[in-house]
Every structure is written in structure tokens, then in C-alpha cells.
């Protein structure tokens, strides 16, 4: 299991790094084996930053990430290599992951020299053949080809196949189907679902609510770096409670319902409040919160459903939105 | 009848030969109609849209006619098109947002644009202010540079500018694609309000996102590989499409409420053909599960019921 424990990221910006930009604020969730979590948010909400922290492409400013209970922060050398055997990422633009002057299957030989230098050729070839078939690619159609000779869907599947060559536990998929046509999107989505049923844990990063809803069992809604709502996907989508989540869901273009109707049929937000971290410190007026006001914390509103706000049914919550 | 396109063919010249990007399109858009144009990337949507405005250097007019409000558009004649462009037919191109001149304040840019069309800025000033209001921007936007506006604000400004002369036809090419869902909805609904207010008479909304079209379009035209596959009312295209391509396309779309665990959707196997040497017969043949002997011949695009046209032998019968 991969756990994110209250992770935050502050980028230094400005000419001399004099300004702080808080891109991710106090985010926590777990990814279990055989589970897809969708991390949903509009552009700039911090989705990619979360993915990069998990992949150790950037440092975590605050908080920690653990894989099977072990902190991943200080892994280096051989330990880091082992980490990458278990945790891999695939990104939005398949073309940028390939060097156009090399054949596309070079991404496999790089994995071989890095992780499987001792494996006999025949065994390696059989392994590649196996992962290609598991992502429904016909080996002779994709091996020995240049990137421009393959479609976006094929290139994305090759990248997933590359990740599968390793002893993968967690896959970070950052907008991997946004660039694909509707007709091939669904096949890559189904492929992820298939991998999940074989025990992989997947962080599915997307700005598209309908894709997240289709594939994931858990949903995390991110807004300006903070989680505003998370929990079981059917609960977050079925009973959206944070004003921001409600706005997002009523703005998604659907195929059989007009926007006005979606808005009308949205169930009322769950009333009342659960005990969030913030409430413990600030249950009633009179005590000053020990955290900045712009830092929503999560209140449990029902089983497996959390909403970030101070007082769910008050005006403050809508101000946050 | 607002727009009538008849057998329009536009190719791209390349060293390898002609790319047959728009290979015979016949359809019409009625007054007040918002027609959506959808299909996989590379099927010729932008080519169709652009050809009604301006053929760039590599585009080659092969044949066909375009009639707007009774007047024939000389689309093969760049200079001849000048009197129609912007006034009668206007476009919001794909990537319009990044195409705005970054060194000009928006107000100055608008003044130059209308003056280049022989109209004094003062003549349109009141209307401009009204429309800036209408799209929810503040009047000081004219004193700003494009770079100072967010994506959604820029998109709304481009919409105002491109419709200042109340064109008969507005072509909007993928204008919501790069936007976040909330902005996307606002921009799409603004398009509808422009039609409702008479700022434009009819519209062609190009997008690869059929669910946006379900929200705002009256009718949808589906293209495949440079040809028209099906055109019908939005409701018919979504609920009762007849062309196998449309059927597969619509059923491959996940929407909120559809979950993998309950209902596994499927895509369309294979990929669209090259338009350099397009396949003979029905261009969808290699991917079509219903293909039969007749499909080696090209199916005509025929009206099977009122306002519903399809190009498929399975639907029209082999004697069409
Ligand atoms: N390397 C960086 N340096 C400074 N700011 C960054 C950097 N990367 C991302 N940001 C900022 O952090 C915020 C979150 O970005 P990102 O994680 O890419 O969001 P998303 O993937 O949701 O679009 C944005 O405001 C973005 O501009
Ligand atoms: N300038 C060009 N030169 C050669 N081929 C082009 C050019 N522009 C577009 N094409 C080709 O024409 C076909 C249709 O393109 P386009 O109209 O842009 O499709 P869409 O807008 O549906 O994605 C594609 O096969 C594309 O590769
Ligand atoms: S004409 Fe034939 S190949 Fe083409 S869509 Fe119809 S059945 Fe399929
Ligand atoms: Mg991102
Ligand atoms: Mg296009």
C-alpha cells in the first residue's frame, strides 16, 4: 500500500526564488493494491505535483509518503532502484516520452539495461512479448517501429507495457488518455481496469470527471492544492457535498442530460458535520484556530466520504468554493 | 436556408501527393440552427470549417459550391471572399486564444480590425460595450493586453470580436477543448446566447467532444475520414444513430453515472485510414463490424427520413 501522509509542496518562484507558491497543501490518501483512485481537479490544482512527489521527481516540502509502511523520502541508489521497480508513471503526451530518432521499443531496452542486465536474451524477449500482449498490442505491429509510425493509443499502451516489465505495485497515470480520441480512450481505460483486477494500485490523474467516475473506486477532488472532497466514488458523485464538487459535477457535459437538468437533480448536500481535524481545535466560536483559515481539513460526512470545509452548512463553506 | 454546401472537395497539396481531407460534403444549416461537427481527429473537421473562410496556401479547391443566404461564396478566390469574411461568415479558429496579437491592447486591436473593414470604431463602440457586458467581462478589458486575460476570458473576448458585425454564419473550431469544465460550460452557453440574441444567425460548432454538442447543438454532423457519415437532430444522433461509426462512437463515451464495474464500454478497434491514399468503397469498411460485399462501393450520403442523412449501405439498402 502506498500512503500519502499530509503532504504539501511549496515551489519557490520569482526571479530569485523569493516567492512561495503552495501547489499542494496537506493531502492524505492511500492507494491499496487492486484499487484505482482518481485524483480530479482543474488545471493548476496540483495533480501533477502530487504525482511527481510520489514518483520522487520532486521533493516533498512537508509530510511523508510510505510504500508498505516504509518512508520513501531518503531512498537512494539500490533502494531507489527497488522503489522504481514497484512504482512507475505514465504521462499525458505519449509523443514526448519517446525520442523520435529512435525506435519506440527503445523504451524497453532502457529498462533492460537498467534492471535486467543479466537476463538472457530469449527470456527477455518472451517477457516483452508477454507484457505487450497483456496491453493488447500485437508485438510484430509495434516492435521495430519509429514513434511516428504508431498511433497515440499504441504509444500509451507501450508505456504502460514498459511499466509492467517491472514488478509493479503502483502506477501513476497522469492524464494519459486526454490526448487520445474518444474511440481509443475507452480501450486504454479498460486496460487500466484490467490491470487493477490483477492487483495493481493505480493513481488515475484526470481533469475529466466522467473518466474518473467510470474507472475508480475512490475519488479525490483537488482544488488549488487542497482536497475539498474525497471518498468512495459512488458517494462523492452520488452525494456531492462541497460546493466546489457540486459546481464541477453540474458543469460536466453529459450525454443524456442537459446542464439545467443535472443541476436540478443534484441531491441536497449532506447536512451536518463530522469531526474534522479543524473542528477538534475549533468546535465553537471563541477559540482561535491554530491553522490558517484557508486550509480546509476533512470532515467525515458518512462512511467513506470526507468533505473539506470548516462548517459544512455555513456560509464559510461556500466562500471556500 | 442559411448555408448550403454542395459536394465540396478540398485537398492538401503535399510532396507525397494530395491529402483528400474533405472529399465531397453536401449538407445545409438552417437559420438559427447550431450544427455540431464531430469525428475523430484528422477526419477533416477543421478543413471543412476553414474552407468556408479562407483556403491557406496548401489547401486546394477541387470542386463544389457554397451558398450563404442565397449568395454564392467564391471560396476559391481569396480576394473575392474579402467582402464576406468577418461580415457574413466569421470564424473562431482552433488556438484563437494564442493567436491574439500580444503587443496590442484589445481595444486597439478591435479598432484596427473594424477599420480595415471600412467601418469607424465609433460606429460599433456602443454595441461592443453591450456585448462585453453580455459575456460578463468588465469594460476595462479593452485597455488590457491579451496576456493579462485568463483562458476563459480570452475565449469570450474572441467570441465578441468575431461576431461584431452580426455574421450570418459563425464557425467555432474546438473553442472549449482547452478549457476547464466550469469555463467550458460558460463558453458553450455563451455561444447559445449569441444565437438567441441574434448576434449570429447560425453556427457550426466543431469539437471532438460529442457531449458538449449534446448540451448546445440542434443538429450534429458526423464526419469520418474526409466524408460525411451521418447528419441528424442531436437527439437522433445520440439516441438513435444509424451509421455504424456513429453508433460505436456514441457508445464508447463514458459519462457520469456509467461505471466500469457495472457496464464495460468498448472502443472502436483500429484507426482511421490515411487520406493520402484513402481506401476505396466505404472508408469505414476496415473497422466496420457490419461490412458486407456491397461496401467495396462508396455509399452515397442520402436522406433516410426528414432531416436525417446517412452514408451506409447497411442502412440505405444496396440499391440506394
Ligand atoms: N516547477 C514549478 N515551479 C513553480 N511552480 C510550479 C511548478 N510546477 C507547477 N507549478 C505550479 O503549481 C501549481 C500546480 O501545478 P500542477 O501540479 O502542474 O497542476 P495540475 O497538474 O493540476 O494542472 C500551478 O499553479 C503551477 O503553476
Ligand atoms: N497543412 C496540411 N498539409 C497536409 N495535410 C494536412 C494539413 N492540414 C491537415 N492535413 C490533413 O488533413 C486531414 C484532415 O485534417 P483536419 O481537417 O485538421 O482534421 P480535424 O480538424 O478533424 O482533426 C488530416 O489527415 C490531416 O493530417
Ligand atoms: S457502408 Fe458498409 S462498411 Fe460502411 S459503414 Fe455501412 S456497413 Fe459498414
Ligand atoms: Mg497536470
Ligand atoms: Mg481540427
Image (cartoon, rainbow, N blue to C red):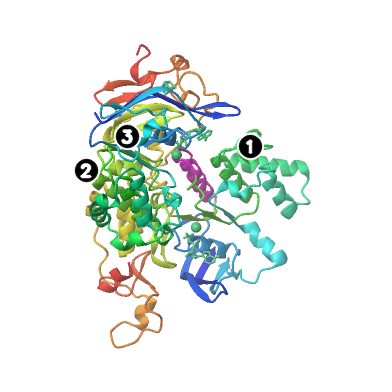
Q: Earlier in the sequence, mark 2 or mark 3?
A: 2
Task: Find residue A142 and name its label.
Answer: 1
Label 2 residue SS? loop
Q: State which chain disc 1 sits on.
A: A
Q: In this view, does B88 lie above or below B190?
A: above
Residue A262 visible somewhere in the drawing: no
Q: State which chain disc 2 sits on.
A: B
Viewport quadrant of the C terminus of chain B? top left
Residue at 44 percent of width and 63 percent of height: A45
Query: Residues in magenta?
Result: A180-198
Question: Residue B111 at x, y = what percent?
Answer: 34, 52
**Magenta stretch: residue A121 in it?**
no
Q: How crowded is mark 3: few (under 14 residues within 10 Å), some or many (20 or more)?
A: many
| In this picture, residue B95 sits left or right of residue B188 | right
**Dot 3 corresponds to which residue?**
B220
Q: Residues within 10 Å of mark 1 (few under 14, many from 20)?
A: many
Q: Residues within 10 Å of mark 2 (few under 14, many from 20)?
A: some
Amino acid at each position: 500500500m502506498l500512503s500519502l501522509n499530509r503532504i504539501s509542496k511549496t515551489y519557490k518562484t520569482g526571479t530569485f526564488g523569493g516567492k512561495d507558491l503552495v501547489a499542494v497543501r496537506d493531502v492524505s490518501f492511500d492507494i491499496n493494491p487492486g484499487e484505482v483512485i482518481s485524483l480530479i481537479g482543474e488545471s493548476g490544482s496540483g495533480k501533477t505535483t502530487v504525482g511527481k512527489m510520489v514518483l520522487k521527481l520532486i521533493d516533498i516540502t512537508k509530510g511523508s509518503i510510505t510504500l508498505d509502511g516504509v518512508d520513501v523520502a531518503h531512498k537512494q541508489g539500490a533502494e531507489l532502484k527497488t522503489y522504481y521497480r514497484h512504482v512507475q508513471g505514465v504521462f499525458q503526451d505519449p509523443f514526448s516520452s519517446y525520442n523520435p530518432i529512435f525506435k519506440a521499443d527503445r523504451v524497453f531496452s532502457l529498462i533492460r539495461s537498467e534492471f535486467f542486465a543479466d537476463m538472457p536474451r530469449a527470456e527477455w524477449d518472451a517477457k516483452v512479448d508477454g507484457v505487450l500482449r497483456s496491453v493488447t498490442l500485437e508485438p510484430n505491429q509495434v516492435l521495430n517501429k519509429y514513434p511516428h509510425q504508431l498511433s497515440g493509443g499504441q504509444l500509451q499502451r507501450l508505456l504502460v507495457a514498459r511499466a509492467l516489465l517491472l514488478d509493479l505495485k503502483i502506477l501513476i497515470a497522469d492524464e494519459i488518455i486526454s490526448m487520445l480520441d474518444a474511440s481509443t480512450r475507452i480501450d486504454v481505460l479498460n486496460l487500466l481496469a484490467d490491470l487493477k483486477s490483477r492487483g495493481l494500485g493505480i493513481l488515475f490523474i484526470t481533469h475529466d470527471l466522467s473518466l474518473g467516475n467510470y474507472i475508480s473506486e475512490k475519488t479525490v477532488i483537488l482544488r488549488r492544492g487542497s482536497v475539498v472532497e474525497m471518498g468512495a466514488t459512488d458517494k462523492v458523485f452520488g452525494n456531492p457535498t462541497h460546493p466546489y464538487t457540486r459546481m464541477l459535477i453540474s458543469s460536466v457535459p453529459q450525454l443524456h442530460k442537459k446542464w439545467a437538468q443535472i443541476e436540478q437533480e443534484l441531491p441536497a448536500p449532506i447536512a451536518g458535520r463530522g469531526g474534522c481535524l479543524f473542528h477538534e481545535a475549533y468546535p465553537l466560536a471563541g477559540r482561535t484556530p491554530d491553522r490558517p483559515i484557508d486550509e480546509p481539513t476533512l470532515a467525515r460526512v458518512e462512511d467513506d466520504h470526507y468533505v473539506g470545509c470548516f462548517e459544512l452548512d455555513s456560509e464559510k463553506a461556500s466562500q471556500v468554493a | 436556408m442559411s448555408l448550403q454546401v454542395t459536394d465540396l472537395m478540398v485537398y492538401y497539396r503535399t510532396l507525397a501527393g494530395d491529402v483528400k481531407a474533405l472529399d465531397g460534403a453536401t449538407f445545409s444549416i438552417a437559420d438559427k440552427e447550431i450544427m455540431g461537427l464531430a469525428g475523430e481527429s484528422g477526419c477533416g473537421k477543421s478543413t471543412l470549417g476553414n474552407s468556408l473562410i479562407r483556403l491557406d496556401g496548401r489547401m486546394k479547391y477541387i470542386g463544389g459550391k457554397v451558398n450563404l443566404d442565397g449568395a454564392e461564396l467564391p471560396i476559391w478566390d481569396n480576394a473575392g471572399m474579402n467582402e464576406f469574411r468577418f461580415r457574413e461568415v466569421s470564424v473562431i479558429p482552433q488556438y484563437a486564444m494564442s493567436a491574439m496579437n500580444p503587443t496590442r491592447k484589445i481595444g486597439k486591436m478591435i479598432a484596427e480590425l473594424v477599420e480595415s473593414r471600412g467601418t469607424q470604431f465609433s460606429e460599433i463602440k456602443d454595441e461592443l460595450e453591450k456585448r462585453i457586458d453580455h459575456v460578463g467581462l468588465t469594460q476595462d478589458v479593452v485597455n488590457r493586453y491579451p496576456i493579462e486575460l485568463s483562458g476563459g476570458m480570452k475565449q469570450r473576448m474572441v467570441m465578441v470580436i468575431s461576431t461584431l458585425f452580426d455574421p450570418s454564419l459563425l464557425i467555432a473550431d474546438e473553442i472549449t477543448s482547452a478549457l476547464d469544465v466550469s469555463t467550458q460550460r460558460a463558453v458553450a452557453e455563451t455561444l447559445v446566447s449569441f444565437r438567441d440574441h441574434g448576434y449570429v444567425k447560425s453556427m457550426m460548432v466543431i469539437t471532438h467532444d460529442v457531449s458538449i454538442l449534446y448540451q448546445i447543438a440542434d443538429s450534429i454532423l458526423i464526419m469520418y475520414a474526409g466524408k460525411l457519415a451521418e447528419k441528424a437532430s442531436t437527439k437522433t444522433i445520440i439516441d438513435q444513430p444509424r451509421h455504424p461509426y456513429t453508433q460505436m462512437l456514441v457508445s464508447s463515451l463514458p459519462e457520469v453515472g456509467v461505471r466500469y464495474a457495472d457496464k464495460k464500454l468498448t472502443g472502436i478497434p483500429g484507426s482511421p485510414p490515411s487520406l493520402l491514399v484513402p481506401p476505396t468503397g466505404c472508408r469505414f469498411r476496415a473497422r466496420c463490424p457490419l461490412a458486407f460485399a456491397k461496401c467495396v462501393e462508396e455509399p452515397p450520403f442520402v436522406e433516410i427520413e426528414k432531416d436525417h442523412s446517412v452514408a451506409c449501405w447497411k442502412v440505405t439498402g444496396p440499391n440506394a
